[in-house]
Structures are given as structure tokens and as C-alpha cells.
Amino acid sequence: MVVNGLVNISISTIEKRYELKSSLTGLISSSYDIAFCLLSLFVSFIGERGHQPRWLAFASFMIGLGALVYSLPKFFSGKYQFGSLFEDTCLTPKNKTSCTASSSSLFYYLYVFILGQLLLGTGGTPLYTLGTAFIDDSVPTHKSSLYIGIGYSMSILGPALGYVLGGQLLAMYIDVDLGQSIDIAEDDPRWLGAWWIGFLMSWIFAWSLIIPFSCFPKHLPGTAEIQDGKTSQIHQSNSLQHTDGNFGQSFKDFPAALKNLMRNTVFMCLVLSTCSEALVTTGFATFLPKFIENQFGLSSSSAATLAGTVLIPGAALGQILGGILVSKFKMTCKNIMKFALLTSITALALTFVFVYANCENEPFAGVSESYNGTGELGNLTAPCNANCNCLRSYYYPICGGNGIQYFSPCYAGCTNSVSKRHPKVYYNCSCIERKTEVTPTPSSFSFEAQAGKCSSQCKNLPVFLGIFFAAIVFTFMAGTPITVSILRCVNQKQRSLALGIQCMLLRLLGTIPGPIIFGITIDSTCVLWDINECGIKGACWIYNNIKMAYMLVAISVTCKIITVFFNGLAVFLYKPPPLGTDVPFQNQNSVVTTVSLECDLSKAGHDG
């Protein structure tokens, strides 16, 4: 809820309040993964032989502390001062902004946010490694997948709850605690919401779990009987080093344990398959709203809502369905891997929906359309708005009555507006062809342009969302089975370490590079950049929709093929113990591992 929900939804507000660039807020987001990567191997190795519920109590303490630290800048940065509203019409005199690099003391709060994320990463590490192994310890083999599936689906519903809670809190003014009345509304560009309240609530909630976790025994009642009833399904290979019963009790065994797991080819294939899957799922969790917004001409909030409606229920349903099917049919390790391979192939086929979903760009003056036959493409300035001194750094799209979109009221040459109507409407626009001069009156219903993008003529959205939902379900349906396969194909005593290796590689090869690769790819399709007074390139305003759709198909299909390849290789290489040689689960002398799309979801969304 905190890491993938509240942090993600508050990023844009924090950027504005503390004057941070997107590259710096990206560093805030990745700080969680950095802490996780640094600690996962050591925490999983040391915690495996410790009191795991107390490690989870420590995780609750660190998550609460991280949430508290993340909220602190609100209380030390003083009251938010909003300036006067900028009205970008043609006759408005523009303040000539000088090109100077301004330094603000607010910048230093960046380090507080990073510290908060590092603490959250420290808390997340025991949760996703030791916690999963503890669940697997405490239930019979055939029920393990069901419990793990339910647990992982919570890591999808958590971000959903964070988005809903954060969205409601952003509708409250940032300084609501000061009790002062303000004269700006939520749709005002200067408005900032109360991003910090959710973190304080999470702090209290996380710390309330410390005592309950601490009260659990080292092993739940009945665990010994459950362990005695389990049989080993560890991958048999001559390259695996077998060890004595005391192996793993000392930290000096750490390198040997690590080497033993890395030489388990089935385990490594399963880990690499989830890395490629994590890359594409975190990329979509971050950029699916932007894709929907640009392809189908929706507002940012509508696109984010639709993306969440597809991603979150689809991922949760897939995780639970995968766990239920494996549990119901009591699949062996090899059959579980075959099931994961089948769902991955289905998800690969459904990924081609992006080819069908692409939509032509709507006409945009100065980009894809000329200004009534004047001006040139690629230049927003034309004879009809040359005297308006418009600011390229102020993007406020409006839709003309002629169905053409304009960069801002100023670039459309509009001189009058009526703000009491919603959406706001503009009159006397020199760049929009009209027959008569318009004088706005309260009773007039005609206008030349209105605020917002032109509505898209593309009708593919419902079909796209339906097929993409199915692709998400099948993608995540493999998540729990692969985790269970990893738990089965490695040694009982090293399952937590295996989870640690998997989570570390998942981040290094999947969730960290995923959004970066998607971001670079999407930026390569940009046709209109934000350029400020200093000539520095900022965000992209307009993308080539067709090119974007095909680029995303290329990345998705490549990652899915890698996933299918490694899943198939794992099925081919896996050698179960010989029949008639059932080994009690507790007496295994090699290493156990877990692969989990869960670890991926602890980042998705930039997450979602």
C-alpha cells in the first residue's frame, strides 16, 4: 500500500511542492529497490535459521518508521505558498522569465524521502523472503500454493488501496492541518493535495502489527507433523553439492550456499523467466496509463482509473486462480512447471492486442496540421499567433470547434474566455476559422474552443481493455505456480536464501530496468517536447501513437518469448527424485528456492 500506492500517487505532488525534477523523484522510487537488493541475500540467509515471526515484527517496525520519515518534510518545510494564477490567453502580458538556475532549500528534503524509501526497503526484505518461506513451512504441500497465492494477491490489492486512499486524500488541501481557509479549488493548477496523511496512517497501522507478530512462536503448532508428511521434489543433478545436516548454521557457509543455488539449473531458469516477466509487468504498471491516455485521447485521471481497473483485478485474479488450480489438482513439481509454461504461452499470444489497439493521432495544429494553411509543421508559431508571445513551457490543450487540437489558448490566438462554464470555453481565436466575431454573453451557447483534448474517434478501447485484461490474468496465473516450483526444486534449508536470490535478481534484471527501458522506448516516439525558456527539453506532450503501439509490442513479445524459453527449459531440465525414494522434507541435504512475481509487484507499479 505504501511503496506501490501512496508513494506513486504522491510523486507528482512532491515534485511541485519541493521543486524536484522527475529524474530525482525517479531516484526516490528506486531507493526502495536499492535497499532490497543490498539486503535480501543477507537477511534471507541469516533469518532462515532465526525466529521468523520476530523478523516479521522487525519488518513492521521498519515499514512504519519508513512511512513516518517519508511524511516528515511536510512538518519542517513550512506553509505552502501558492502564487497567482497564470492565464494564458493571447492578450495577457507575459512575464519575461530570465534563464537562471535557481537553487531552493526545499531541494534538500529529497534526502529525507530517499531515507524513508531505504527504510521501507529494509522492512520489505524479510516480508517477501522469510514470510513466504514461513507460510510454506506451516501448511501441507498441496495447500501451499493456495496460501501463497492469497498472500501475493494482497500485494496487488495493497497498491489498489493505496491509490484509492491517496486519491481521496489529494482532494484535501495540503495544509488542511493548519485550519486556514483558501480561495483555490481542486481544478486549479496551483492546488496541492494532502499527500502526507496516508503515510501517517500507514505508520500507525504498521506499528500496530509489531506485537501480534512478536507473539507467534518460532514454528506454528503442528508444523513438525506437516514437515514429516512432506516428500522431497528437489531437482536431482550431479552438479549440485550435497551437504551435511549442520550446513547453513554459520555465516561462513554463505558463499557455498550461494554457489549451490546458482548451480541449480532449474532454479536459475525459473528465476530468469520471472525476471523477464517482471521487466514487462513493471513497465506496463508504470506506463499503461500514459499509453491509454495518448492512444484513446483520455484525461490523465480517466486513463489512470481504467489502467487500475484492468491491472489490479486481473493480477489479483491471476495469482489466486493459479494457486487454486495447483492446489486443487495437487500437481507435482514438473506438472506445476508445465502449467506455468502453458499460461505463459497464452499470455504471449494475447500480447499482440497492441497491434490492434493502435489509433491514429488526432489533428494537432503545428504538429500534424497547419494553421488554416499557414505556418509550417513542427513549429507551433504561425502568423495568426505570432504577436501573442506565447510560452512554449505552458501546455494547456484546447479543442477547437473545427476538431483540431491546439497547444494552448494563446497558440490558438484566443483573446476571451468564460471560466464559469465547465469545461472552460474560449472566444475570438484568430487561429480558428470562424464566420462572425463572437461576443460572449451569459446566454450564448456557441464557442470557438473549449479546454481539454479533442475527443478521440478511436473506438477500439473496450476490445483492447478486454483482451489486455485476459493477458494480465494469464501472466499472473503463472506467478504462484513458479514460486511453488522454486520452493520444491531447492533444498528445505535454503528456501529463504533462494527467495533472496530471486528477489535480488528480479530487481536487478526486471523491476529496476523495466520502467527505464519502457520510458526510453516511449520517449523515442515523441513528436512534440516541452522546451522551457532556457531551451532545456522537459516532458513530452505529443507521441506518435502508431509507433508507440508497435514499439510496446516489440518489447512485450521479446520479454514473453524469453519467459516461455526459460519456463520450457526448466521443464526439460527438471529431474525429480527416483520413484520409490521418498525423502522426508526435513531431511533434505541440498538447497531450496523460491521465485515470485510478488517481488515484482512490490515495485509495480510504478507500480499501478
Image: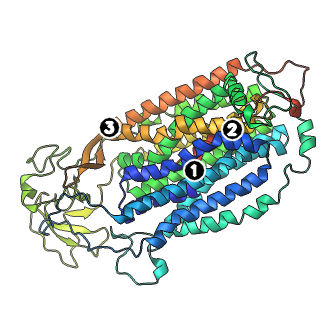
Badge 3 density bin: few <14, some 14–19, many ≥20, Cα 10 Å: some
Which three-letter amino acid code belongs to the residue tagged 2? Leu
Q: How is the image coloured?
A: rainbow
- What residue appears at the point 23 percent right and 47 percent down from the top-left corner? 363
Q: Which residue is mark 1?
A: 312
Q: State how far apart marks 2 and 1 are (Cα).
A: 24 Å
Most extreme residue toward the front, as rendered?
252
Using the rendered view, name the quadrant where residue 46 is placed.
top right
Location of the N terminus (image quadrant):
bottom right
**Residue 228 x/y as whole percent:** 92, 36
Q: Which residue is mark 2?
A: 499
Whether label 2 touches label 1, CB < 8 Å: no
Q: State how far apart marks 3 and 1 are (Cα).
A: 28 Å
Instruction: Out of 276 and 293, give the one closest to the viewer.
Output: 276
- What residue appears at the point 57 percent right and 47 percent down from the top-left corner? 35
Q: Which residue is mark 3?
A: 524
